[in-house]
Image (tube, rainbow, N blue to C red):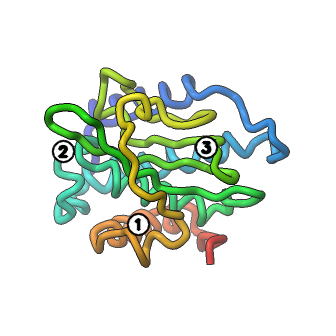
Amino acid sequence: MVMGKASNRKRDRRLARAEEEAPEMWADGRPEDWGKQVRQAMLDTLDLIEQLRAEHRLDDLPQYKNYPAGSCGITSYTVGMVLLDRGLNDGDGQWFLVDTNDSGPETATHTWLEYRIGTEAVYSVDPSIGQFPGIRKTPWVGRGTSPAAKRFTGRWPLQPVKTADQEWAKPSYLESLQRVRERLEQSTRQPLVSGHE
């Protein structure tokens, strides 16, 4: 099943807002277009997730049932691995999965990505922050930590993206990544560069 025109327009508007709202940044010695490459990797991945969902190719992965709600771990992991595949884990830092919770009466959890140099969160990518419209309605790419950090203050140990498949990811996360990678390779007709091995 292909996405209908209304679904395509809705997705295009959401992705365009994420592009417009992401500030220019990356002034710490990275190539000038590093931030644009990070943002593009996230947008490409989210677009493919939307396509796969529309085709019912993710129906067997429960985290995508109410996407983006409840999908922060699987989506952040998938985006993080695509960032590594594209060689965007260079320099002095590395990407981490930030697993958090809030202290509200219903204790919600959330996961996003941070590019850290030492202990400092230099950049972040929060592809599923839109599930919390009171914080932000569109995916986040920007300096420092995710805007969600103000609400989600409880932290579990950081998980490096490069080893998440061995220590953190659930089987469904690996399956999501495989399906996105297959679609990326089909769309580019080139094998992905795996820079995280």
Residue 82 percent across, percent down from the top left: 53, 60
Crowd band around label 2 with a 10 angstrom C-alpha radius: few (<14), some (14–19), many (20+):
few
Rendered view: 8 above or below 60: above
Placement of 17 over or under 43, stated as above or below: above
Badge 3, how many Cα within 10 Å: few under 14, some, many 20+?
some
Horizontal side, residue 14 vs residue 23: left or right: left
Residue under pointer 3: 121
| Residue 131 on image: x %, y % | 29, 34
Quarter the C terminus occupies: bottom right
- Tag 2 residue: 66
Which is nearer the N-term, disc 2 or disc 3? Answer: 2
At horizontal 51% and vertical 47% (from top left) the residue drawn is 42
Q: Amino acid at mark 3?
A: Ala
Which amino acid type is shown beneath numbered disc 2? Answer: Asn
Q: Do labels 3 and 1 touch, CB within 8 Å?
A: no
> For the point 66% across and 47% down, which residue is it?
37
Q: Are there few (<14), some (14-19), or many (20+) residues within 10 Å of tag 1? A: many
Relative placement, left or right, of 57 versus 83 is left
Which labelled disc corresponds to residue 65? Answer: none
Q: Which tag, 1 or 2, sits closer to the chain's start?
A: 2
Q: Which residue is mark 1?
A: 177
Callout 2: helix, strand or loop? loop
Quarter of image, res 87? bottom right
